[in-house]
Image (cartoon, helix red, strand yellow):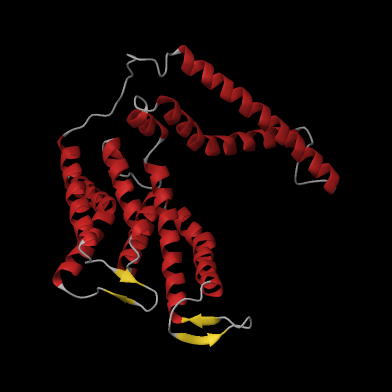
């Protein structure tokens, strides 16, 4: 992480419930204001967590993906009554399908960005802490799966460097030689993965993982700060859900574009949703300014 994340220091239950709320709302709220609130807040939090890496990822992958999704949807989706023109296939190109494609692209980008923040905050030990006693086998498998990709990547770099030192560089030589060297590295990585899985399973079994009555050390404590955060999440979740069920955040794209934009209550629902999505960023900025003020005073 490029910055010290204050929100990651909260109790794992608070972290998990927060991401559960924002991901649930992002997937089910198709209101354009809600979508772009979620996307903007997710990008802001990702930039705070990962710095320049988040910006590069957004420009190199997220933006082209959004453009692709926005372009593909009108090609296959021909619903809507506002016909702009006709495609070479004879199918109509409608304004509603274009707008819906843009909204779907924003939703997809927001979900992926929120998941990138989730993986940075909800570490494997937090996940095991929350679900280790409820679903010990599944929580262990999920924790190992989430941890496997970065661990595999780091080990792959080590093996590739070692093979390069003995003259088996995957980037040099003929195509056949490079392919042979790549197969060698891949074979080593498969063997390493299997051995690592067996060692992990034996280690967890010897420690009595999953047995009834087993206790485990934990550094997480649910304090007053976590209680306040949990109350805030409960309030936001209840208020936003009430607005959603009452139709205050309703929006449709077919057969015509229609939804709720004005009014005191619809605006209040969107403002609370904005506050919910920006909660980690607000906490981080507040703590950073407090820390800078303390350093300035000393």
Q: How many marks?
A: 0
Q: Residue 244 appears at what percent x and percent y?
A: 24, 61
Question: Looking at the picture, does residue 55 appear above or below residue 84?
Answer: above
Left or right of 53? Residue 126 is: left
Q: Is 191 displayed left or right of 73 in the figure?
A: right
Considering the image in quadrants, where does the C terminus appear? top left
Q: Is residue 105 visible?
A: yes
Tell me what residue is drawn at x 53 percent, y 38 percent. 150
Question: Which residue is drawn at the image coordinates 53% and 16% (left, top)?
Answer: 202
Q: Is residue 98 left or right of residue 180?
A: left
Horizontal and vertical percent position of residue 291: 22, 46
Q: Position of residue 297 (x, y in %)?
A: 16, 47
Q: Residue at x 31, y 70 (%)?
A: 251
From this view, report whether residue 246 is shown above or below residue 291. below
- Judging depth in this view, the residue of 269 and 37 nearest the camera is 269
Which residue is nearer to you in this view: 212 or 194?
212
Give the left or right position of residue 27, taking residue 191 as reference.
left
Residue 270, located in which quarter of the rendered image? bottom left
Residue 71 in percent (x, y) is at: 53, 72
Residue 278 seen = no
The answer to whether residue 258 is above or below residue 234 is below
The N terminus - image quarter: top left
Q: In this view of the protein, which residue sits in the foreground, 239 or 119?
A: 239
Query: In the figure, residue 30 lies in which quadrant?
Result: bottom left
């Amino acid at each position: 992480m490029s910055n010290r994340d204050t929100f990651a220091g909260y109790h794992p239950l608070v972290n998990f419930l927060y991401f559960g709320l924002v991901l649930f709302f992002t997937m089910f709220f198709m209101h354009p204001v809600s979508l772009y609130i979620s996307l903007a807040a997710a990008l802001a939090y990702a930039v705070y967590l990962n710095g320049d890496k988040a910006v590069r990822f957004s420009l190199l992958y997220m933006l082209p993906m959004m453009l692709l999704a926005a372009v593909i949807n009108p090609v296959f989706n021909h619903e809507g009554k506002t016909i702009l023109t006709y495609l070479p296939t004879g199918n109509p190109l409608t304004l509603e399908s274009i707008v819906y494609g843009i909204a779907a692209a924003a939703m997809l980008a927001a979900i992926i960005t929120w998941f990138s923040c989730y993986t940075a905050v909800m570490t494997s030990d937090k996940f095991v802490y929350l679900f280790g006693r409820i679903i010990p086998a599944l929580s262990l498998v999920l924790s190992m799966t989430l941890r496997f990709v970065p661990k595999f990547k780091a080990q792959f770099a080590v093996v590739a460097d070692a093979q390069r030192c003995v003259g088996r560089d995957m980037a040099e030589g003929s195509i056949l030689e490079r392919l042979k060297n790549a197969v060698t590295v891949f074979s080593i990585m498969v063997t390493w993965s299997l051995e690592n899985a067996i060692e992990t399973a034996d280690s967890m079994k010897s420690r009595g993982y999953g047995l009834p009555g087993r206790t485990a050390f934990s550094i997480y404590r649910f304090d007053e700060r976590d209680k306040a955060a949990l109350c805030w999440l409960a309030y936001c979740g209840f208020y936003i859900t009430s607005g959603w069920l009452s139709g205050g955040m309703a929006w449709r794209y077919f057969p015509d574009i229609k939804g709720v934009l004005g009014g005191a209550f619809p605006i209040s629902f969107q403002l609370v949703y904005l506050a919910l999505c920006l909660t980690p960023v607000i906490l981080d900025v507040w703590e950073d300014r407090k820390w800078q003020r303390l350093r300035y005073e000393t």
